[in-house]
Image (cartoon, rainbow, N blue to C red):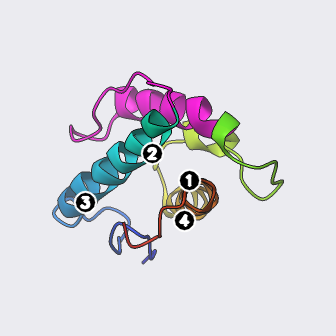
């Protein structure tokens, strides 16, 4: 199991992923709103659909577009987000990096992890 700000997940749990998808999408929208208040409107393709190759691609593009709003931090990288969850190890590594990205971005934008 992996603990995320958007809910806890178990690799391969198709039912458990649905609440995570919606909470995660809401976090992206909250981040976009904060960036928008700074005068920048970033494009966004929602992330509430099935998690597949297209989802991973759109998600990676979102995080790449937000990197400029984060302080330089070697612990936060979007590089591994292109990796799909095709095994338990990739699932764990992806989520650890992803959690860190949202944490660093949230701090930069003044958003708590609970949001």
Of mark 3 and mark 4, the one earlier in the sequence is: 3
Could you tell me residue 74's position as x and y percent?
A: 84, 54
Q: Residue at x 65, y 44 (%)?
A: 80
Alpha carbon distance from label 3 to label 1: 26 Å
Q: Quadrant of the N terminus?
A: bottom left
Read off the residue under disc 1: 109
Quadrant containing the C terminus is bottom left
The answer to which of marks 2 and 3 sits earlier in the sequence is 3
Contact, mark 1 vs mark 2 (Cβ under 8 Å)? yes
Q: What is the C-alpha distance between the residues marked 4 and 2?
A: 28 Å
Q: Nearer the viewer, mark 4 or mark 2?
A: 2
* Mark nearer the N terminus (4 vs 2): 2
Verify whether residue 60 appears in magenta: yes
Residue labelled with disc 3:
17
Kindly check if marks 4 and 2 are in contact, taking CB atoms under 8 A apart as contact: no
Query: Which element type, helix, strand or loop, lies under badge 1?
Result: helix
Q: Which residue is mark 2?
A: 34
Mark 4 or 1, nearer chain start: 4
Query: Circle 4 is placed at which residue position?
Result: 92
In the displayed structure, does residue 30 sit left or right of residue 73?
left
Question: Compared to 106, does 36 lie above or below?
Answer: above
* 10 Å crowding of disc 1: few (<14), some (14-19), many (20+): some
| The magenta segment | 39-67
Q: Position of residue 77 (x, y in %)?
A: 71, 47
**Which image quadrant is residue 56 in?**
top left
Near mark 3 (Cα within 10 A), the count class, few <14, some 14-19 or many ≥20, is some
């Amino acid at each position: 199991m992996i603990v995320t700000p958007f809910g806890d997940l178990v690799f391969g749990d198709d039912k458990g992923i649905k609440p995570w998808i919606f909470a995660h999408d809401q976090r992206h929208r909250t981040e976009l709103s904060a960036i928008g208040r700074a005068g920048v409107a970033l494009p966004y393709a929602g992330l509430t659909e099935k998690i597949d190759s297209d989802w991973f691609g759109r998600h990676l593009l979102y995080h790449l577009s937000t990197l400029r709003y984060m302080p330089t931090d070697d612990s936060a990288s979007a590089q591994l987000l292109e990796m799909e969850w095709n095994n338990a190890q990739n699932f764990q590594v992806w989520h650890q990096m992803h959690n860190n990205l949202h944490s660093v971005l949230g701090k930069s934008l003044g958003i708590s992890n609970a949001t």
